[in-house]
Amino acid sequence: MKYIVILGDGMADEPIPALEGKTPLEYAATPNLDRLSKLSEIGMVHTVPDDMSPGSDIANLAVLGYDPQKYYSGRSPLEALSIGVDMKETDVALRCNIVTLSEEDVPFEERVIIDHSSDEISTEDAAVLLKEVMKELANETYQFYVGTSYRHCMIWNGGSVVKLTAPHDVLGSVIREHLPEEQILLDMMKRSFDILKDHPINVKRREAGLHPANCCWFWGAGTKPTLSSFEEKTGKRGMMVSAVDLLKGIAVGAGMGVALVEGANGGLNTNYEGKADAAVKALTEDGYDFAYIHVEAPDEMGHQGSVERKVQAIGYLDSRVIGPVAEKLAASGVDYRMLVLPDHPTPIRVRTHTRAAVPYLLYDSTCPARHDWNYNEKEAAASGELVLQGHKLLDKFLQLTYDDTIV
């Protein structure tokens, strides 16, 4: 038996008037999910404990079967693992987003945060900008590491796990109330703005109608993580397929393989087909038992507040990942189980994560159920299936059995 999780980051949402009162998941064209849902169990799962922040770090740990209350030590340390940072016990890792702040003639604190991703800046351009910052700000205490797109890392040797605000949580806000209390971090942010705002790359971006990548924003502080082995925990050899350093870092920490997919960038126009092919190859050719495909695009479109593009991202997930994976696994002749879900909602209304339960779909090729339902928030809630502790969903998935009944 092979196992595959397909996770549409931030895919869950709320009913939207512009979509005839439907959620993006209800409204999007998802013929493959519609077909599979008739043969699957659907239900709801709480992926984020009540006393924890609804981040992708916490939620994806839970989906992978790790109790966040036991294993979570911060988001940035997981990302540091993925880019090869050998953290010391005295190190604190921080996410270093390259963001877009407004550029009117006002004090730094009065600027507005416009875009947490700088219009999904390319890794190549972001690396050039970050290296300019490093020339002035990097030293033995503060080391910077290039990640993917707008997502980068800073290691603070001998630092503290200070409270910091995620930029995607305060989009459109004046930044004064959301800046670090730690003076050195605030000073570095201010200096990064001065370094980046007139850089030639940003001049060209403005000319092209793109947001300038004009400031480093620190958040997600944490200490060196310790995850137990996924294979020892589950008996399954696992492969991670993701463009996002956070997910790759979780995989490294858990001893899973990490597939490198050319053109996978965490945006709307990522290499969906490459991700699907990498997972299928891992399961059918490379001896892996478990594959986890993470697609960031629905979450990014939720943060952008774009109804149209979030619907498009969900449609792409269905047609370019879920459909091909199901087709190729069936053609290979292997028995398999598939779990489809978001990690958390990213509602268009608020443009950030919420802690509401999310819908899941469980399919087993060896004993398909027969149901008259579709996979979405409303019908999953109506099914009566509810997993209260998200980290227990994986056990349900790996031990899944169905009664082949008509509902």
Image (cartoon, helix red, strand yellow):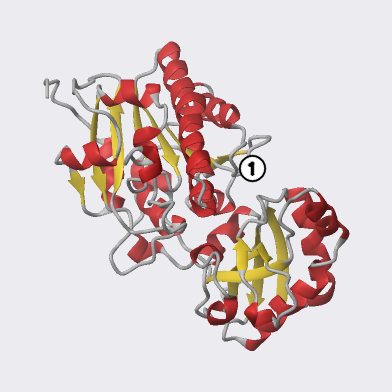
**Left or right of 43: which side holds 192?**
right
Quadrant of the image occupied by residue 235: top left
Q: Position of residue 109 (x, y in %)?
A: 64, 81
**Residue at figure coordinates x 85%, y 66% from the top left:** 198
Please give the count of numbered marks on the rendered protein: 1
Quadrant of the image occupied by residue 43: top left
Is there any visible trace of residue 60 in the rendered image? Answer: yes
Quadrant of the image occupied by residue 113: bottom right
Q: Which residue is mark 1?
A: 265
- Where does the C terminus fall, quadrant-wise? top left
Q: Position of residue 383 (x, y in %)?
A: 16, 37
Label 1: how many Cα within 10 Å (few below 14, some 14–19, many 20+): many
**Left or right of 3: which side holds 112?**
right
**Residue at figure coordinates x 21%, y 53% from the top left:** 388
Per the image, label 1 sits on a secondary structure element best described as loop
- Residue 390 vs 316, above or below: the answer is below
- Residue 389 vs 262, above or below: the answer is below
Front-most of residues 385 and 229: 385
Q: Amino acid at mark 1?
A: Asn
Q: Position of residue 21 (x, y in %)?
A: 31, 41
Q: Position of residue 353 (x, y in %)?
A: 42, 58
- Where does the N terminus fall, quadrant-wise? top left
Front-most of residues 394 and 343: 343
Is there any visible trace of residue 141 in the rendered image? Answer: no
**Residue at figure coordinates x 40%, y 12% from the top left:** 333
Front-most of residues 244 and 206: 206
**Left or right of 397: which side holds 288?**
right
**Left or right of 318: which side holds 378?**
left
- Residue 27 vs 391, above or below: the answer is above
